[in-house]
Image: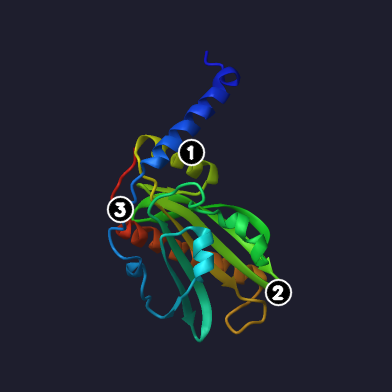
């Protein structure tokens, strides 16, 4: 029987060495199509492109991005972000939104995962309920690339190490949907429970569409 306690540290060191070696020889993989092709319009919504500052982009290390706000009846309905990394190395890899949210003033009320069906396939993505002052929002996010849609940060890191070492490329996208929860008494709201359910339903619908559209612009690299 394999004794992980005895050989585990050596295995971790080996994987780390392979990652370093693979990272040095990694190739940057360009998108198959522009990110602007991801959901540029949506029936019933006014779409506004948003800009991420140069310093924020530098810190995040992203190669490219598209951020959009979708308005309905002159009110923000939801926002999307797709940030793409043509390769990931030390200091230039995807940052988990879970680690960035507190610094932006958001408090996590609940977190977990949710199933999403897209083009007949079932995926699991992250789902969080956030609060910032009196504002609440439902957030869906996941990591998409190299033929995978992944929620777990641990799985993402393992895939990154393995693919850097054995495949020589680590291109990947972070995809996020933020849906404001209408406060009780708002024109389009109701009870908090109903507003939360409506925001969750909309978020799942948009997430399903985004998984499909993002897959069309990502490199067709497949999985190992």
| Residue 219: numbered disc | 3
Residue 119 at x, y percent in the picture = 33, 56
Q: CA distance from mark 2 to mark 1?
A: 38 Å
Dot 1 falls on a residue whose secondary structure is helix
Which is in the foreground here, disc 2 or disc 3? 3
Residue 132 at x, y percent in the picture = 68, 69
Q: Residue placed at 32% from the left, 68% from the top?
A: 37
Within 10 Å of the Cα at label 2, are there few (<14), some (14-19), or many (20+) other Cα atoms? few
Q: Residue furthest bottom?
A: 74
- Residue named by callout 2: 134
Q: Is residue 201 visible in this depiction of the protein?
A: no
Q: CA distance from mark 1 to mark 3?
A: 20 Å
Give the left or right position of residue 26, taking residue 75 as reference. Answer: left
Residue 50 at x, y percent in the picture = 47, 75
CB atoms of marks 2 and 3 within 8 Å:
no
Using the image, determine if residue 12 lies above or below residue 103.
Answer: above
Dot 2 falls on a residue whose secondary structure is loop
Residue 32 placement: quadrant:
bottom left
Q: Is residue 60 visible in this depiction of the protein?
A: yes
């Amino acid at each position: 029987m394999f004794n992980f306690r005895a050989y585990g540290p050596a295995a971790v060191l080996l994987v780390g060495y392979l990652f370093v070696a693979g990272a040095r020889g990694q190739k940057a993989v360009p998108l198959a199509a522009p990110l602007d092709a991801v959901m540029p319009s949506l029936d019933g919504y006014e779409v506004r492109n948003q800009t991420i500052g140069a310093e924020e982009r530098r810190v995040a290390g992203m190669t490219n991005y598209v951020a959009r706000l979708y308005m309905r009846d002159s009110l923000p309905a939801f926002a999307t972000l797709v940030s793409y990394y043509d390769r990931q190395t030390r200091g230039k890899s995807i940052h988990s939104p879970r680690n960035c949210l507190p610094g932006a003033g958001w408090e996590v009320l609940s977190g977990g995962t949710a199933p999403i069906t897209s083009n007949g396939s079932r995926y699991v993505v992250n789902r969080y309920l956030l609060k910032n002052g009196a504002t609440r929002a439902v957030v869906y996010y996941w990591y998409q690339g190299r033929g995978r849609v992944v929620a777990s940060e641990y799985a993402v890191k393992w895939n990154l190490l393995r693919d850097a070492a054995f495949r020589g490329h680590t291109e990947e996208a972070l995809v996020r949907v933020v849906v404001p929860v209408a406060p009780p008494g708002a024109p389009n709201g109701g009870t908090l429970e109903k507003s939360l359910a409506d925001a969750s339903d909309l978020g799942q619908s948009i997430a399903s569409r985004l998984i499909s559209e993002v897959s069309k612009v990502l490199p067709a690299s497949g999985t190992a």
